[in-house]
Image (cartoon, helix red, strand yellow):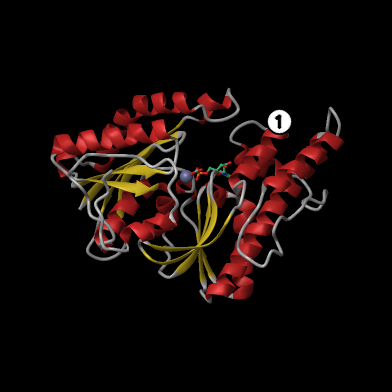
């Protein structure tokens, strides 16, 4: 089965082709990505209307590129997948519209995929693929969640951020430090030359006794500390603040992940989403894994942030495992707000047709 997948939930247009195999994870035949980061950087954040328009411009050329690189034709596509949510409504509608129009023209079924499920399953495309069950630390720009994952489609939320996501904490801290958008990679790069213990920043909910997160207070503490540095902080001061901010975020993520492993009794952790690209997070988790004898799995670096490969993969894995059926109704809707654990509830009565 060949699945063509489209991702357009935010500021990256992604297209990919995956093929299922008799044994093992589906094979990624080719994927292509266009990032709108430069366009939005001028505004200091994503402008939804511009994002939608740019997805329209990019999606068909990227599709041609993917098919060419895979040495495949549209006639070989069996299912068309798209990100159904969560994300920006207009941006999602572009991917959904293109996917359904293409599928209708080809006479093939479609499947709407949960964006976070794409992230969550993306480590299956790495050389060191995980096995079920595992604890997933999902750290994207809009979500910070710990989940227990028993199989495709079986996700139980263990804890999540009650306010800002870790990615937002990176982005907002970076913005107020004048590092531009998106802040995560910039802040992390600056942090490499700073001292993580230079400034005492809060570790919100670290000892809350549950697996929830809170990062809104941290951003305020970073703002206060930045103001104290005055109008013209030195490069060293900024690097120290970046390193201290990153250390606060990473420490909370690592300790809560360890608590989740302990609570569930599982010995496998899967990290995914944009913040999963953070070098310091990976270093600290790898170190903890060695000390405490658990396994930790990441997506390939290029598949940490949004991409089409994870959407095509999630669709293929759902179809293969019987967790979903593709639909030929083409009556697509999108779900800008869509909790991942709601997939469970929808699917509990058996496979569903993803239609409005
Ligand atoms: O998963 P993603 O690409 O998009 C969403 O689904 O939200 O995640 C984007 C987030 C942004 O907040 C970005 O700043 C953060 O991931 N990010 C990083 C790094 N690379 C991306 N944060 C920290 N360190 C990084 N290296
Ligand atoms: Zn994402």
**Residue toward you, 79 or 128:** 79
89 sits to left or right of 301: left
10 sits to left or right of 246: left
* Residue 51 image-quadrant placement: top left
Residue 102 image position (x, y, % from top left): 21, 35
Quadrant of the picture in which ligand 1 is shown: top right
**Residue toward you, 272 or 191:** 272
Residue 192 in view, yes or no: no
Residue plotted at (71% across, 55% down): 204
Residue 243 in view, yes or no: yes
Residue plotted at (43% across, 54% down): 340
Residue 33 image position (x, y, % from top left): 40, 36
Residue wearing tag 1 = 178
71 sits to left or right of 121: left
* Residue 261 image-quadrant placement: bottom right
Determine whether 127 is above or below 62 in the image: below
Residue 254 image position (x, y, % from top left): 63, 61
* Residue 213 image-quadrant placement: bottom right
Kind of element beneath mark 1? loop
The tally of labels here is 1
Residue 325 image position (x, y, % from top left): 23, 54
The quadrant the C terminus occupies is top left
């Amino acid at each position: 089965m060949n699945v063509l997948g489209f991702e357009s939930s935010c500021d990256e247009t992604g297209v990919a082709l995956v093929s299922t195999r008799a044994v093992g994870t589906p094979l990624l035949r080719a994927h292509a990505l266009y990032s709108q980061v430069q366009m939005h950087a001028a505004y200091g954040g994503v402008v939804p209307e511009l994002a939608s328009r740019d997805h329209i411009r990019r999606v068909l050329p990227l599709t041609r590129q993917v098919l060419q690189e895979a040495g495949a034709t549209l006639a070989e596509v069996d299912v068309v997948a798209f990100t159904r949510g969560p994300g920006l409504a207009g941006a999602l509608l572009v991917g959904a519209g293109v996917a359904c129009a293409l599928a209708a023209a080809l006479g093939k079924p479609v499947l709407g995929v949960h964006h976070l499920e794409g992230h969550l399953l993306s480590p299956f495309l790495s050389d060191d693929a995980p096995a079920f069950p595992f604890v997933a630390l999902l750290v994207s720009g809009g979500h910070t969640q710990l989940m227990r994952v028993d199989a495709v489609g079986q996700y139980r939320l263990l804890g999540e951020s009650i306010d800002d996501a870790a990615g937002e904490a990176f982005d907002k801290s970076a913005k107020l430090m004048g590092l531009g958008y998106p802040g995560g990679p910039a802040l992390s790069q600056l942090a490499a030359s700073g001292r993580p213990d230079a400034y005492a920043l809060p570790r919100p909910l670290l000892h809350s006794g549950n697996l929830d997160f809170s990062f809104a207070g941290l951003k305020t503490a970073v703002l206060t500390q930045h103001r104290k540095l005055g109008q013209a902080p030195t490069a060293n001061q900024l690097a120290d603040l970046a390193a201290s901010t990153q250390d606060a975020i990473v420490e909370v993520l690592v300790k809560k992940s360890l608590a989740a492993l302990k609570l569930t009794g599982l010995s496998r952790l899967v990290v995914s989403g944009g913040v999963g690209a953070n070098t310091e997070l990976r270093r600290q988790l790898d170190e903890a894994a060695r000390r405490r004898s658990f396994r930790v799995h990441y997506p390939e670096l290029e598949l940490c942030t949004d991409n089409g490969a994870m959407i095509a993969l999630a669709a293929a894995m759902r179809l293969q495992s019987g967790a979903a059926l593709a639909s030929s109704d083409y009556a697509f809707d999108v779900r800008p707000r869509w909790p991942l654990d709601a997939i469970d509830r929808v699917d509990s009565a058996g496979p569903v047709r993803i239609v409005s």
